[in-house]
Image (cartoon, grey):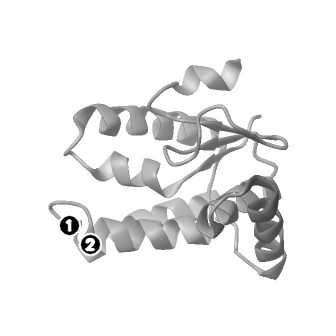
Amino acid sequence: MTAVFVDTNVLLYSEDGADADKQSRALVWLKELWTRRCGRLSTQVLSEFYVNATRRLKPAMPSGDARAEVRRYQRWHPWQVDQATIEAAWAVESRYKLGFWDALIVAAAQQQACEILLSEDLQHDQRFDAVRVINPFVLGPEALTS
């Protein structure tokens, strides 16, 4: 089974009706990951989701609803960002010239042996060793079988 790490922006688009096309594509991906039980994320992603969902979305998601979503994604056993993950992120940052927060996402995906990282923020089809970036608004879940 291919483990798929989900970046914050995918979770946010799934809740944001401002862009119906992106919302629909995000929801299709998330439904597939729930069905296959192969979704992964980190405490960083859940923290970013909560803050942005309650502040950036228009209208803002009520805090209680955002907390419920974070609790729901706890079933994916989010990667706990620890010192080893930070060290790995520094290595990714240096090797690939990424910003630290993006490098921390990549490092968490690597720590969980994810083959795919769903993100709009990183270059589509870029590889970070065994992790391949897929922009979920370019490719759908059929990418899991290719």
Residue at mark 1: 60
Residue at 83%, 41% in the rendered image: 130
Which quadrant, please, contains the C terminus?
A: top right
Indicate the position of residue 52 as horizontal and vertical percent values: 35, 68
Q: Foreground: 22 or 103?
A: 103
Residue at mark 2: 55
Please give the count of numbered marks on the rendered protein.
2
Is 38 positioned to the left or the right of 61 in the image? Answer: right
Whether tag 2 and tag 1 are in contact, CB under 8 A, the answer is yes
Is 77 positioned to the left or the right of 19 in the image? Answer: right
Indicate the position of residue 121 as horizontal and vertical percent values: 51, 48
Say whether residue 92 is visible.
yes
State the residue lying farthest toward the left.
59
Say whether residue 65 is visible.
no
Amino acid of disc 1: Ala
Is 62 positioned to the left or the right of 90 in the image? Answer: left
